[in-house]
């Protein structure tokens, strides 16, 4: 259960790594682009579109949402946090429009997972394999991309924007592209989660960023963050462990309603303890905050 | 050939803090010139470099690089013609990325970036070769993150990155000022060597009078946003610190200049 969820939510963490860690951009679009992916996929599925196209459409919609946040920040000079919050708010209405209501059930229709569920074995095994393949395929593609010429320019945008601009890179473009990719991953996750849990819901994105950050912090503590490969691996590993911790917590009597508070406190402690210890650098270095 | 025509730049125009940083300055820089620029704090030295590189746009006047008008081109679009090194060694490199990745990014200065492998195999040998010339042992650390290097090593790497694609104009903004004297000396020697080997056209801003006299074939002094004097050739070679101080002592109140 938690392994399957950890893998698919690992894509959200991967998206957050690109925004927060690679671009140093505190992107809050995620809480809106995650349900966006779910909404687009769910609506198209009940309209009878083959699931694979529905997922592709969800990915594209996430990409577009991320690009919009990038445009707000780079072209309209809106503060990065505010740009994300604005998009998140706008997407709430967009998602309701796409779904036509606040919730779409997918239990009675065919999804990308239906063929796997019809196999003669426990439903979880093939789904875990599929999510494992997807999560690691996306991770490896990200690793490769971040070592291309464009990828290097994108990493430098988050590391030293002034320097890469003097080398002739339009950092507006790299920022917009990076946020697009980040939110495409998040929307992909949203589309898969909707099909896995059997419904898309307008509230499914609430607290997604904080959960993603918690995952990243856990992952980086274990895997480290020296290289790109480690940063992306940390997202997936961290997400799996985070879900594991949550399920253990629930079994030990943590009320599901307190889940987001527990996650929040986890992130606050991880970010706050270095400050209390008076260490110079906290866990997150961000531009424009 | 770089031509600057009557440029003017005022900061915080129309406010009580209005400051004329560059006041109708004109300057012709023939190919191969190595100009040192001195002047007290607030004389407009760094602003001049920022106007040339496109960090700021002048209020008036024009800037040409090889007869191409670049006055209003954004920074990233004129990058192909310019190499620049800042005073702060942290500013010229991306700390979280490796030495070879930093060089590879500089290798593509002003060029199209696509989805090819960032660090190509063939270039890696070349990077190793030029790093060896620095004599800092960096040729064996291509895959080390730049954050592991000392200030002097980082500034030397920045120097390689700024000159790798042989820019039309090299801008040095007190690039050895933040280093300890011995490292600064070494970085200056390297700078001169690279400039001479490639006959790079260079503008070097410095706070150090001795350096301004020792290096380059031409020296200009800025005062209140314009050129106070502009000497070259024989006159420059025979110049001494004492002479400059005697002539312009009033404008050179800044003590660091004499250090």
Image (cartoon, rainbow, N blue to C red):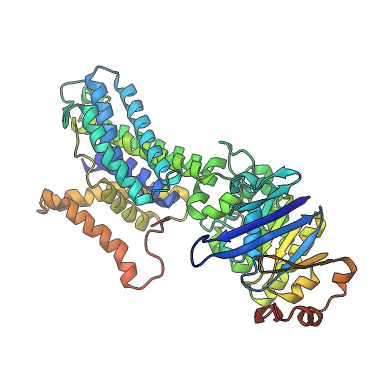
Picture quarter with the N terminus of chain A: top left
Task: Please state if B3 lies on the left or on the right of B120 as rendered.
Answer: right
Question: What residue appears at the point 63 percent right and 42 percent down from the top-left corner?
Answer: B120
Whether B145 is drawn above or below A206: the answer is: below
Residue A232 versus residue B222: which sits nearer the camera? B222
User: Does residue B184 appear anywhere in the picture?
Assistant: yes
Residue B227 versus residue A231: which sits nearer the camera? B227
Question: What residue appears at the point 42 percent right and 52 percent down from the top-left corner?
Answer: A24
Residue B226 versus residue A59: which sits nearer the camera? B226
Residue farthest top in this picture: A48
Residue B68 position in % (x across, y down): 72, 43
User: Does residue B85 appear anywhere in the picture?
Assistant: no
Residue A47 position in % (x across, y down): 24, 18
Picture quarter with the C terminus of chain A: bottom left
Question: What residue appears at the point 60 percent right and 68 percent down from the top-left corner?
Answer: B151
Whether A188 is drawn above or below B143: the answer is: above
Question: What residue appears at the point 81 percent right and 65 percent down from the top-left corner?
Answer: B218
Quadrant for residue A60, please give it.
top left
Quadrant for residue B178, please give it.
bottom right
Whether A259 is drawn above or below A43: the answer is: below
Whether B218 is drawn above or below A262: the answer is: below
Task: Please state if B182 lies on the left or on the right of A41 as rendered.
Answer: right
Residue A139 versus residue A30: which sits nearer the camera? A30
Residue A31 position in % (x across, y down): 27, 43
């Amino acid at each position: 259960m938690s392994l399957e969820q950890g893998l698919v939510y690992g894509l959200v963490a991967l998206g957050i790594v690109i925004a927060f860690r690679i671009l140093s951009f505190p992107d809050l679009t995620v809480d809106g682009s995650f349900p966006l992916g779910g909404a687009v996929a769910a609506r198209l599925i009940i309209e009878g579109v083959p699931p694979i196209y529905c997922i592709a459409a969800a990915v594209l919609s996430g990409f577009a949402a991320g690009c919009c946040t990038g445009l707000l920040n780079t072209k309209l000079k809106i503060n990065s946090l505010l740009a994300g919050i604005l998009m998140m708010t706008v997407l709430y209405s967009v998602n309701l429009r796409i779904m036509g209501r606040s919730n779409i059930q997918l239990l009675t229709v065919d999804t990308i997972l239906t063929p796997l569920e019809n196999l003669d074995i426990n439903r979880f095994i093939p789904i875990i394999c599929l999510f494992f393949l997807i999560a690691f395929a996306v991770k490896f593609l990200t690793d490769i991309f971040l070592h291309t010429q464009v990828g290097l320019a994108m990493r430098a945008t988050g590391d030293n924007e002034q320097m890469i601009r003097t080398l002739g890179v339009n950092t507006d473009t790299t920022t917009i592209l990076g946020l697009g990719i980040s939110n495409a991953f998040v929307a992909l996750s949203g589309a898969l989660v909707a099909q896995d849990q059997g419904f898309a819901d307008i509230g499914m994105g609430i607290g997604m960023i904080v959960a993603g950050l918690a995952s990243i912090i856990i992952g980086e503590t274990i895997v480290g963050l020296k290289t790109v490969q480690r940063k992306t691996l940390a997202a997936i590993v961290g997400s799996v462990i985070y879900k594991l911790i949550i399920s253990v917590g629930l079994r030990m009597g943590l009320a599901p309603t307190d889940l987001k508070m527990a996650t929040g406190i986890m992130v606050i402690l991880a970010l706050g303890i270095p400050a209390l210890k008076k260490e110079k650098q906290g866990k997150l270095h961000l531009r424009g905050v | 050939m770089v031509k600057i025509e009557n440029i003017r730049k005022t900061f915080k125009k129309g406010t009580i803090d209005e400051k004329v940083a560059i006041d109708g300055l004109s300057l012709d820089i023939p190919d191969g010139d190595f100009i040192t620029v001195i002047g007290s704090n607030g004389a407009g030295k760094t602003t001049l470099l920022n106007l040339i590189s496109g960090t700021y746009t002048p209020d008036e006047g024009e800037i040409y690089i090889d007869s191409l008008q670049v006055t209003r081109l954004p920074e990233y679009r004129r990058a192909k013609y310019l190499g620049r090194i800042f005073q702060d060694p942290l500013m010229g490199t991306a700390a979280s990325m490796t030495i070879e990745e930093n060089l590879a990014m500089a290798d593509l200065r002003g060029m199209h970036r696509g989805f090819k492998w960032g660090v190509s195999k063939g270039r890696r040998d070349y990077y190793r070769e030029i790093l060896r010339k620095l004599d800092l042992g960096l040729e064996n650390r291509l895959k080390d993150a730049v954050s592991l290097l000392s200030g002097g090593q980082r500034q030397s790497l920045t120097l390689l990155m700024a000159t790798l694609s042989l820019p039309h104009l090299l801008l040095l903004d007190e690039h050895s000022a933040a280093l300890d004297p011995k490292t600064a000396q070494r970085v200056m020697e390297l700078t001169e060597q690279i400039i001479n080997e490639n006959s790079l056209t260079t503008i070097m801003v410095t706070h150090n009078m001795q350096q301004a006299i020792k290096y380059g074939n031409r020296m200009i002094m800025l005062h209140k946003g314009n050129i106070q004097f502009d000497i070259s050739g024989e006159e420059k070679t025979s110049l001494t610190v004492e002479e400059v101080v005697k002539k312009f002592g009033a404008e050179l109140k800044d003590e660091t200049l004499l250090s």
